[in-house]
Amino acid sequence: MEQKEQKISSIREIYQAADISMLPEFIKSYKNDTRSGVVALLTKAEKQLEALEKEKARTEGMKKFEKEYASFGYLCGIDEVGRGPLAGPVVAGAVILPKDCDILYLNDSKQLTAKKREELYDIIMEKAVATGLGFVSPERIDEINILQATYEAMREAIHKLEVKPDILLNDAVTIPKVDIQQVPIIKGDAKSISIAAASIIAKVTRDRLMEQYDTVFPEYGFASNKGYGAAVHIETLKKYGPSPIHRRTFIKNFL
């Protein structure tokens, strides 16, 4: 009877303040309360738990390669962002996750919201055994081409790891001049939690860098377009000409 006398607004506050791990107890506590407002809250809680179980299953499926190559030792995911933009660097990420990694929601960084990427970035940096980032400038991209620049960024990211990996899981490519066994995986950032984690830290790092460039070259809208060829960016490029961070080999068709 006490629970039925408790205001629905109070129960709602308890629900809103509850961590997802507390929801089973919340459901148990109010399962006999038949008021429609409480029933609606219980339904929400149950759906959250169902979604959590689905996410756990999805994440477990993304550990296929990690399990397959676990016996090799330290396993490192490699990915890059910034091949296609007209401006800014290409950035590569390298991540060694713990074997008992329990991070949820890891996925191809393009499939995540900016907010979720930022949240996961902090978790990855906290829980990873080691992380490394590699950067190649627009000038260097123009000098050696974007594919070679991508390889260079990846090699730098690997070199910056505090722990040397025993095997690399790469998103689609085989990196030249690397003496570590490699496993190229097509669309690997959606199939491997290690590659997904590398994708996320590279994407967040590059996005933050482009937002900083926006304060120096505000006319190009780098904070919003991140250097990619959005229509407004191309119009501005034609109007003002290239900035020091534009890739000359990428913009010659627009000027």
Image: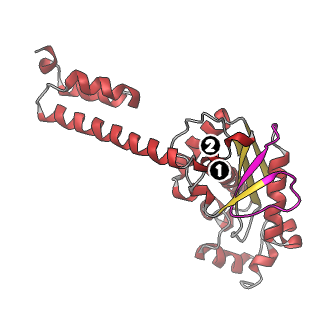
Q: Position of residue 109 (x, y in %)?
A: 58, 55
Q: Left or right: where does residue 31 sit relative to residue 90?
A: left
Choose between 115 and 170: the one closer to the eye: 170
Q: Is residue 166 magenta?
A: yes
Q: Secondary structure at mark 1?
A: helix
Give the answer, above or below, for where 248 lies relative to 114: below
Choose between 44 and 151: the one closer to the eye: 151
Residue at 69%, 52% (x, y): give it.
Answer: 202
- Under mark 1, the amino acid is Val
Cα separation, mark 1 vs mark 2, equals: 7 Å
**Which residues lie in the magenta part?**
162-181
Q: Mark 1 and 2 residues: CB-CB less than 8 Å, in contact?
A: yes
Sequence-wise, which precedes: disc 1 or disc 2? 2
Q: Left or right: where does residue 32 sit relative to residue 218?
A: left
- Under mark 2, the amino acid is Tyr
Badge 1 density bin: few <14, some 14–19, many ≥20, Cα 10 Å: many
Give the answer, above or below, for where 240 lies relative to 24: below
Q: Position of residue 34 (x, y in %)?
A: 11, 30
Badge 2 density bin: few <14, some 14–19, many ≥20, Cα 10 Å: many
Q: Position of residue 217 (x, y in %)?
A: 73, 62
Q: Quadrant of residue 175?
A: bottom right
Q: Secondary structure at mark 2?
A: helix
- Residue 121, labelled with which disc? 2
Q: Residue beneath label 1, please?
A: 204
**Quarter of the figure with the N terminus:** top left
Residue at 65%, 62% (x, y): give it.
Answer: 226
Q: Is residue 42 magenta?
A: no
Which secondary structure is most common in the magenta stretch?
A: loop
